[in-house]
Image (cartoon, grey):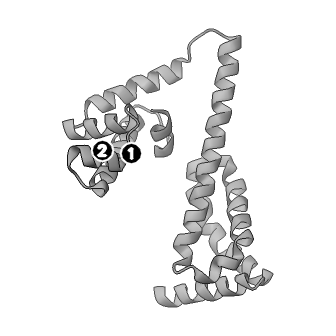
């Protein structure tokens, strides 16, 4: 079943690579319901913009589509990259807004402080190895490969540990009533 789906998608990609707008429309309609819920969870109201940007990128790179081995994975990767760009922009806009707020109002951001406190509590509950890996990554700014070398572990172990750690922090925050996507936890904390 997945082989025929993959072949159908590869055929669509080949047609799109040749400039077939109907095939592109078909691909868009096929992936819109798959991408939208995933992106709404990540970027809320910007999801439609992210989808539009992802499909613009797909169309602009259509000459490379026939070489794509796994179309579905590639489409989700393009969407994830566009989502990441949107989150960076949202983050940048939030920083600008926060800077303006701080310039005009000297009162501290209580919500941020509370979230930061909960994050610190969650970090304190980590196992020593998870805590060490998290701190090396977030506080020292080291890349997974660097951490792996220093701790004599595989890069995949480091990446899996960071993913699990972020999920644990997110769960802790959710238990405290604070819901943040993992990417925001990673970026801000």
In the rendered structure, find residue 143 and report the number of the disc placed on it: 1
Which structural element holds mark 2?
helix
Measured as percent of width and height from the top left, residue 172 is found at: 35, 36
Measured as percent of width and height from the top left, residue 18 is found at: 75, 86
Residue at (51, 24) in percent of width and height: 112
How many numbered markers are drawn?
2
- State the residue in front, 86 or 44: 86
Q: Which residue is mark 2?
A: 147
Tell me if label 1 and label 2 are in contact, CB under 8 Å.
yes
Q: Tell me the quadrant of the picture where the C terminus can be found.
A: top left
Measured as percent of width and height from the top left, residue 159 is found at: 34, 52
Left or right of residue 186, residue 55 in this image: right
Residue at (56, 66) in percent of width and height: 76
Does residue 1 appear anywhere in the picture? no
Is residue 108 shown above or below 58?
above
Is residue 24 shown above or below 112?
below
Which structural element holds mark 1?
loop
Residue at (27, 49) in percent of width and height: 148
Q: In terms of image quadrants, where is residue 116?
A: top left
Measured as percent of width and height from the top left, residue 37 is found at: 58, 59
Is residue 105 shown above or below 116?
above
Residue at (25, 32) in percent of width and height: 125
């Amino acid at each position: 079943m997945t082989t025929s789906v993959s072949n159908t998608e590869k055929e669509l990609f080949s047609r799109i690579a040749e400039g077939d707008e109907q095939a592109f429309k078909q691909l868009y309609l096929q992936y819109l319901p798959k991408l939208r819920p995933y992106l709404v969870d990540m970027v809320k109201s910007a999801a439609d913009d992210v989808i539009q940007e992802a499909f613009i990128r797909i169309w602009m790179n259509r000459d490379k589509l026939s070489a794509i081995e796994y179309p579905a994975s590639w489409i989700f990767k393009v969407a994830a990259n566009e989502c990441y760009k949107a989150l960076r922009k949202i983050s940048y806009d939030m920083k600008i807004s926060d800077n303006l707020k701080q310039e005009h109002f000297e009162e501290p951001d209580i919500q941020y402080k509370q979230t930061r406190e909960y994050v610190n509590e969650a970090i304190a509950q980590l196992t020593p190895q998870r805590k060490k890996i998290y701190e090396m990554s977030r506080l020292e700014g080291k890349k997974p490969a660097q951490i792996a070398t220093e701790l004599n572990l595989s890069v995949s172990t480091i990446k899996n540990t960071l993913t699990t750690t972020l999920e644990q922090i997110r769960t802790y925050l959710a238990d405290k009533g604070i819901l943040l996507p993992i990417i925001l936890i990673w970026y801000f904390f």
